[in-house]
Image (cartoon, helix red, strand yellow):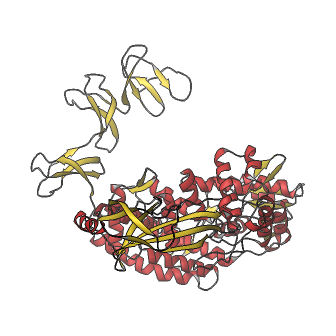
Amino acid sequence: MKNKKIVIVESPAKAKTIEKILGKEFKVVASYGHVRDLPEKELGVDIKDNFKPKYVIIPSRKEVVKNLKELLREADHFYLATDPDREGEAIAWHLVNVLNIPKDKFSRVEFHEITPRVVQEAINNPRDLDISKVEAQQARRILDRLVGYELSPLLWKKVKRGLSAGRVQSVALRLICEREKEIEQFIPQEYWYIWGEFADKTNKKIYGRLISYEGKEVNLKNEEEVNKILEELKGINYIVKDVNKKEEKKSSPQPFITSTLQQEASRRYAFPVGKTMKIAQTLYEGIDIGEERIGLITYMRTDSTRIAPEARMEAIKCIEENFGKEFIGGEKKTKKKLGIQDAHEAIRPTSVFRLPEMVRPYLSEDQFKLYKLIWERFIASQMAPAIYDVVEIYVEGNKYLFLSKGRKLKFPGFMSVYYEEEEESEIDKEIEYVPEKGNLLNLLNLYPEQHFTKPPSRYSEATLVRTLERFGVGRPSTYATIIETLKEREYVVVKDRFLVPTTLGKVVNEFLVEKFPNLIDVKFTAKMEEDLDKIETGKVEAIEVLKRFYPKFKEELEEVYKNSDRVQIAEKTDEKCPICGSDLQLRENKNGKYYACSRYPECKYTKPICDEAKGKCPLCGSTVVKKRSKKGKTFWGCSNYPKCTFASPYEPTHEKCPICGSTLLESNRFKKCSNKDCNYILWKKGRNRKWKKSKS
């Protein structure tokens, strides 16, 4: 074997980049992520034996493991170069155990960026496995399995088959549902502003908003109050009471962490959180730039804004060369917040001298957008603040005070590179004319404005991530998966880029919050994250956290199984019950959706809702609907039954057979003629073939 040194990473793309960097002395192979996990069809956790996990090789990784074992026979040394986080550490630990690598035959290496300097430094400075980090990941996996494996069957029994619940996923759903409830219950409140238009003796104008009377803030709630004040404001003398001029600094933003990158990519480009992470992964793992293959950004799963000193110095050089010394900002002091993992840096370009336009020819459009965003944000984070000239003009008349406020950009600072949108105040605009203090003014016009308070906005993917981060729920590596799971389970749908809970999502949330108020609680879940962090730092044992959690959870679970009735999934409709006139609800059971009276059980009216076929009945032309047999199998049958006996596992379409003109029936794989005497069939994947009747 020519390659005696083996480097194992997760992905083939990452392997390709690192192999180019290390050269022929090394062979770099991919594990394709985790090679072992808890079994799919059983709990896989021996609760009585201190929550001992039972790991099995993932079926799709058996060939990978086989190949790695073959390499082990001839390799001198293994370098485990999986990602620098809990998951990466756990993958490395699993590889050691699955492959049974002797302790003297492997080293753990990690790098925050995939560049020649950093990769070579990592190889030259290996370390041992961080068992505390592995135990933290294992504890999280066990907790998630205990909750998911125990709660999901409960939902099947009490709500609907096929549902799932998760320790963090269910908290995210709760936030979305509670926000929706706030919106539904919101009652708009009326409020008014009064704007004044003034002019001095040279007819130069000033606009200001009424803010106070006799030093007290003016809060106008209705038109009657407004009209009363409008009368008092007319016919009085006005004077410029005060003029304040000052400088206002706007600090540059911090470099990106995972959550802020997800939020900004969503706001600017409407990227879903999952898409942002996939693109960032490709930029981290390596891109072919001419004859060189290199990672363009540092590791993208991080909640630290720390940057390496050499990265700071490179940024300063770039800023000085392109903008000037006055644009260089001071070094940022990052505050240590609870729960932040400071193992690796913020997200930044691996070299600021790889300008976005230089690498654009080698990137897809979406890759370019994200790289440019990361590059600009990092450079901006090391630049000087923007400076505004701020002017405040106070106009007084008979103890009524108006304020005209504006600002003008004096020095762009970081805004030369990166502009953050901000909410613009209605009194925060550039003022062209600034009068002298003591000048007399004439009132030209008064403009009353009616407003209504607005309900809170629904969560977008970005704002949900921000909220989860603020509460300390989940970690950077989990946000995208949480949101994707909620969408896949049809607990939420995306409308106009906002997450809206479905009826099913609301029902599941109400059930979980009512039955498990502690488990589906933001503070409880955040505390659990803190405990996992403490396991990683060696401050607490994993078994202690698990023993504290599980007995109470199991007790609540058994209580719900024993004493809770099955929940009806009911959605409001505009339909009325033909028997009693009450509202009809859209409900769902194992046989599908149906209408039921909201006064059930007093009124037992129901009406089935059947899925209709695209085409009509081939025999009589009536509507064809989806039905269910006594054995539970679905089929398409004529609504005119028993007069018409048409039934088929295939859906009738609008299309006609090109041979005999009969209705075509459709399955996932083909379309075929409904006429039993015609053998026409059109395969969706592949060439036309004749329909062959079964021998039976």
Q: Quadrant of the C terminus?
A: top left
Residue drawn 29% across the image and 26% down it = 617
Residue sticking out furthest to the bottom: 539
In the image, residue 470 sits, relative to residue 60, either above or below, namely below
Q: Nearer the viewer, residue 159 or 694?
A: 159
Direction from residue 400 to residue 57 in the image, left or right: right
Q: Can you tell which quarter of the image residue 208 is in?
A: bottom left
Percent x, y of residue 5: 85, 61
Q: Is residue 356 left or right of residue 160?
A: right
Q: Would residue 101 be visible to someone looking at this image?
A: no
In front here: 87 or 400? 400
Count of marks overlaid on the render: 0
Closer to the camera, 247 or 172? Answer: 247
Q: Report whether 259 appears left or right of 5.
A: left
Give x and y (percent) for residue 611.
31, 38
Identity of the residue drawn at 14% across and 57% down: 599
Residue 95, given in percent of the width and then of the height, sits at 71, 65
Image position, residue 639 (x, y; %): 23, 32
Quadrant into which the N terminus falls: bottom right
Q: Quick one: 257 or 171, which is closer to the camera?
A: 257
Residue 295 higher or lower than 436, as above or below: above
Q: Does residue 228 appear to the left or right of 480 in the view shown?
A: left
Residue 77, picture quadrant: bottom right
Outermost residue, left side: 580
